[in-house]
Amino acid sequence: MSSDLRRVTALTLDLDDTLWPVRPTLAAAEQVLARWLREHAPATAGGMPPAAMLALRAEVAAEHPHWGHDLSAIRLETIRRALRRHGDDPALAELAFEAFFEARHAVTLYDDVLPGLERLASRYRLVAVSNGNAELHRVGLARFFAGSVSARLHGVAKPDPSIFRAACAVAGATPAQVLHLGDDLDADVAGALAAGLHAGWICRPDGAHASADPLAGAHRFADLVAVALALGA
Ligand SMILES: [Mg+2]
């Protein structure tokens, strides 16, 4: 094991694009939402093609900058406004959002994730740190984690150092005892290093950034099983 990782007692992990690919998940969830609206609010469905829904979402986000990190609130208000605009019952928004939200959790884990988490969780406390709105129990991974910190509940998103420190507190460890794992060089790697954590860049061979170099001071891992091997877990 690399000597700087010997003091590590806990790991914090990003979720989207670290444990599962998020783009196909969100695309499928958008389709579920569109289908739900066609069934229950046809006027809205007819009047809101994907591009219009996207534009409305940008409008809602711009009007509520304090929701910047609360994707669920933005999504819910977007649906509510679309329903109202097309004469459907805005009270349907909650049910429509729930259809989307359930589909957003129908993720396909990367192949290394279950064996990797199994090994890592047997040796380290694991805490999820996400800027997205995925919930561990909904994706069936809660059993591996001691807790989670989301930008939505914390109020500030990665790469802000405070969300990493909050995650360390949940893990019961100092930043120097924590290795953060994530796919994003800015939000995860630079953010974790700036907060005093160790950083591991999860860069699967077929990933978008496979040829880039990690930041100085960061470790680079092909997947979670490679992390477990490097840590001797
Ligand atoms: Mg990510």
Image: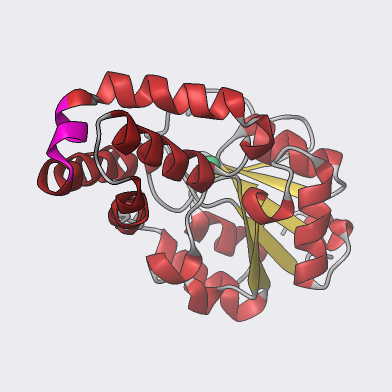
Q: Quadrant of the N terminus?
A: bottom right
Identify the residue at horizontal 44%, vertical 41% (top origin): 75
Closer-to-camera residue (72/174): 72
Residue placed most toward the observer, 229 or 33: 33
* In magenta segment, residue 43: yes
Quadrant (top left/top right/bottom left/bottom right) for the C terminus: bottom right
Q: In x, y percent, where is residue 32?
A: 20, 46
Residue at image position (66%, 48%) is 151
User: Residue 36, position in %: x, y?
Assistant: 18, 48
37, 160: nearer the viewer:
37
Which colour scheme appears in the figure? Answer: secondary structure
Residue 197 left/right relative to 93: right
Q: Is residue 56 left or right of residue 70?
A: left
**Residue 222 visible from this viewpoint:** no
- Residue 232 position, x and y percent, is 63, 68
Q: Position of residue 44 (x, y in %)?
A: 21, 33
Q: Quadrant of residue 207?
A: top left
Residue stretch rendered in magenta on the structure: 41-46
Q: Is residue 80 magenta?
A: no
Q: Using the image, determine if residue 132 lies above or below residue 99.
A: above
Query: Magenta: predominant secondary structure element?
Result: helix
